[in-house]
Each structure stands twice: as structure tokens, then as C-alpha cells.
Image (cartoon, helix red, strand yellow):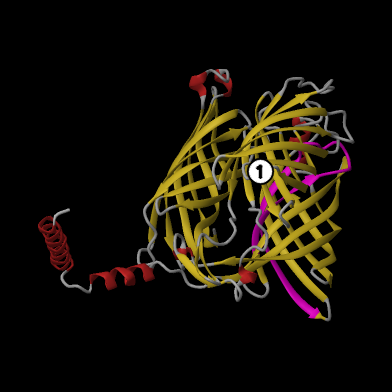
Amino acid sequence: MRKADHLRLRSLKTSLLIASMMLSKSAFGSDEAPRATESDLHKLEASPPTRAGGLVMFDYQAIKIKGYQPVDLVGFHLLNRFNDWLYVGVGGHAPLFKGEYGGFMAFDATVHTEQRLFGNWSASAGASLGGGGGGKTDLQAKTITGTGGFLKSYVGLGYRFNEVSVGLNYSKIRFTNSVIDGSQFGLYVRTPFSYSVAAYGDAGRIFRTKQESDQGSIPTHDSNDVIILGADNLIQINPQGLNKRTVNLVDAQYNHFLTNNHYLLFGGSVGYHGLAGYNQAYGGVGYKVSYSRRFNIYSQIALGSGGYAPDKIDTGSGLLIYPKLSAEYRLTDSLGLSLSGGYLYAPRGTSRNMTLGAALVYRISPKGGTSAQGQGEKDVGFSGHRVHVFSQTQSGVRVGNRYQSKLKLLTAQVDQTIGDNIYVPIQGSIAYSPYLGYPGFGELLAGIGVQNKYSADDTFQVFAQLLVGTNIHGIIVKPAVGVNVGLTDRLAIYGQVGTTRSLDNVGLYPKDFRYRSTSVGLGVSYRFSLPM
């Protein structure tokens, strides 16, 4: 290049640099703009997370039923701690060994109190309100569980061994308008859990932490907890009940990893075709083998309870044993696809089944950091979560040509936010009033929602959501709109209005099974953020 050309090129670069500086001053008012941008970035930093906790509680009791065989119920509850003595959460009850109550299921909201007495001894008391139903036949279910609504109260005395408390409860359970109305002693096992949590307003923000000083607040292993949502097929082997068809199910399962490979699992399934209303809940242990970054094999075994009614599908007392094998291919770091096969059998009944299914695998607890910012530092992001518990009244209920004026449901919904305006809801409901004269109506749904961006300065956060799922008549869709009215960063009043419709336009169900209603819901929300 000639010297004259080199000087002209250098002059052009200088002119462009001066022009860009002038444009910067003109647009931002002064040359302090870069520092203002850095300050704005600081505003996106989250406050340090704190530790929160709660209790996982199992209890077992045998309940006498006048004129019938006793039913034994195992209860499982997940309770969040609000202060040193108060816990609130949700849970359920299902039979295991006694009678022929396969398919009996009840779910509730629980308030639990606990106070240390002396040494390792503690006293507890609580109350649960919910709904459910079941029996050997539909008619027996109506006699045994009445309208489906129930109230349980209890007091207990326990002893703590390290992190596990074992004790004795005295409880009273009453189903409205039923023969279940008595008191009994039972056993319980409780263990605490804890987790890192931040303010709901910190969702989407970053907290920069020193790894050496904050190792306790992030996972020490590489495996992420996962939620699995999918479809399964229960293929009956030589069925003895009245229903001999393959039962199509929707599944939800949560895997909590204890190490890189070992995990605990909790799950449930609801039928949408073949035997709509079939239900099961289970828990167990599993082991993961990673063959590559993208390909994983999961083996697991679970114990649970489920069925419909033993005259339809014979699960006997309800006890289920469920080994399963699945293969997952990870599409992204947070999303995967899996195929599964298993064998589900009822030791105290004749039901034997093969299962074949497919599912989405969504990781909800990544490693605790996104990128290294320097030696010993890591950025930890937070995602927003909400738990809503509310009473839902469905009116104008119609299935085919049959009508019911109102149906009351206890509903729990869990949301995970994706960015400022999108969230993923999972919702389950159980009736505490009769449906067409019978107990045990329920719904299980999942979908997508949109909302306005949360602001600590704005009390209201409005939303619209579309859910797809199943009830006892099959596949339903449930659009709804509503509002969260903030009381504090953590607590809010929750309200929604919506409608429920069967997917009748695809010809899955005859007209007599097409469901429709409108609904109004009111309750409370608990809001928080978890490390991503």
C-alpha cells in the first residue's frame, strides 16, 4: 500500500471513531452512559439465597368401616415450613393391604404444627381437608365415601433419631354422608428437607457467588432433578375384571437425585381412554447410567397403590409393584425425550400388565452455575416458581344430557416461569362434593401460560393459561384467566375463571361422555425462586 493511501485510511478510521463518540454523547446525554449501563446490569443481580425447609411425612392407619372390611391408608405429605412450629402443604392417602379397595384415592391440603417437648421428644397436631373416594364397586364407593369430602384431624407424640422422627398418631377421619367416621391410632415417619431459595422478585436475575464459600448452597453432583410428563399404555395380561381393554394413561413423575446416578422418584398416572378415571400413585428408587452426554438409561422400581374398582380392574387391596426401564435422548441441556417399558402388577389382586410409554424429560435443577467469571466465582441464576392451592367451583356442569348444578374441587397448581412472561403450569384437582351422585371425581392437567412481568411495585400480576389433561370422562381442555394479588413477595391471593370442555370434535368419545362446565377459583399462592 502506498504511503498516501495508508494516511487516508488512518484518517478515515479516526473520523469514524470521533463520529461514534459524538453519537454516543448525543444519544445518552454524556460520556457517562457506559457507567450507567454497568449500573443497570448491577440491578439485575439477585440477593443471596437463603435456606428454607419443610417436612416429608408418611403415616399409616387402619380404619374400621361399619358393615365392611377395614381399609388401611398410607398417607404422603409434603409440608413447607413457615416458622419454627407451623407447616402447610398438600398430600394424599391410598390403600395397601386390607380389603378390596384398589383405586381408592384421597388428596388434601394440610396444616401441621410441631413443638419440641424435651430431649428428642416432640408433640404434633394437624388437620387435613380434601376429597376422594373408592370401593369395590361404584355403588359401594358411594356408601363408603359419601359425597367424597373428608376432614382428618390428629395429634401425635414422636421421638427423633438423627434426621428421622418416628411416632404415634391418634386421628379422626370423617367422610361426609358416609360410614367412615371414626378414630384410630396410627404410626408416622417424618424427615426434614431443605433447599436454597430466593425472593420471587429475583427470578431471572443472577447471583455471583464464591464457590469455596458457598458450596453448601449449590448441588455437589452433576445430575439435575427432573420432571417427566408423558403418555403410557397399560396393556392387560389375561384380565379378570370387567374391563379388558388397554388403558391409556397420562403420567407425571419427579426424580430427585441423591448422587450422580441414584435418585428417589414420586409419580402418578390417570387414565384418559380405555378406563378413564383409572388412577395410581407410587414412589421408589432408581439408578441412571449415562452412555454419553446425550443418552441415558434409567432403571427403577416403585411401590404404590392404584386401580379403579376391583370389579373393573382387579388390583385387590390396591398395592402395586412397578419395575420400569427407560431410555432418554437429550435434545438440549434442559429437555429430553424418553421411551419406557415396564411391568405393573398387583400382588393382592389378579391384575398383571405390561406398560409402554413415551415422555418429555425436563430438568429443573441445573448444576448451580452458568459461567465462570473468574477464579473461584460462579454466576447462579434463579427461576420463579409458584404453588397455588385454591377451591374451585364448577357450575353448569354437563356430561352428555346429564346436568349437575355445581361441583366443588380442591385444586393444587405448580407453575415454573420461563422468562418474564411465560410459565408452565401443572394442575391437579379432586372433588369434595359428589359428581352425579358419586364421589371421587378428579382432574389432572398441564399446559402453558402467559402473564405480565412481575414487579415488586405492582400488586397485580394477571395471567391467561391453556391446560390439557383428563378427567373421568377422558381428555379435556381448560382455558382460564386470572390474577395474583400480592400480599408479600412470597404470598398472594389467587383467583381465576375458566371453562372446561371435552375434546369432542376429534371423535374420541360418544356424546354421552362429553363434558363441559364453567369455573371460578379462589385461594392462595406461595411464590419463590430456585437456583437454575
> Can residue 149 be seen in the rendering of this structure?
no
SS for tag 1? loop
**Position in image of residue 79 (x %, y %):** 67, 61
Q: Residue furthest bottom?
A: 118
Which residue is at a point 40% across and 66% down the rendered structure image? Answer: 44
Q: Residue furthest front?
A: 2
Left or right, residue 63 beside residue 86: right
Q: Position of residue 52 (x, y in %)?
A: 62, 69
What is the chief secondary structure element of the magenta stretch?
A: strand
- The magenta span reads 88-117
Packing grade of label 1 (10 A; few <14, some 14-19, many >=20) is few
Residue 248 vertical placement versus 528 (above, below):
above
- Residue 464 showing in the rendered view: yes
Tell me the quadrant of the picture where the C terminus can be found.
Answer: bottom right
| Residue at 81% from the left image edge and 48% from the top image edge | 73
At x 67% / y 63%, what residue is drawn?
220
* Residue 113: x %, y % from top left: 70, 69
Residue 97 in the magenta stretch? The answer is yes
Front-most of 263 and 126? 263
Question: Which residue, given by chain and number where applicable, does mark 1 sit on?
Answer: 292
Question: Magenta stretch: residue 199 in it?
Answer: no
Q: Up-down: is 441 above or below 496?
A: above
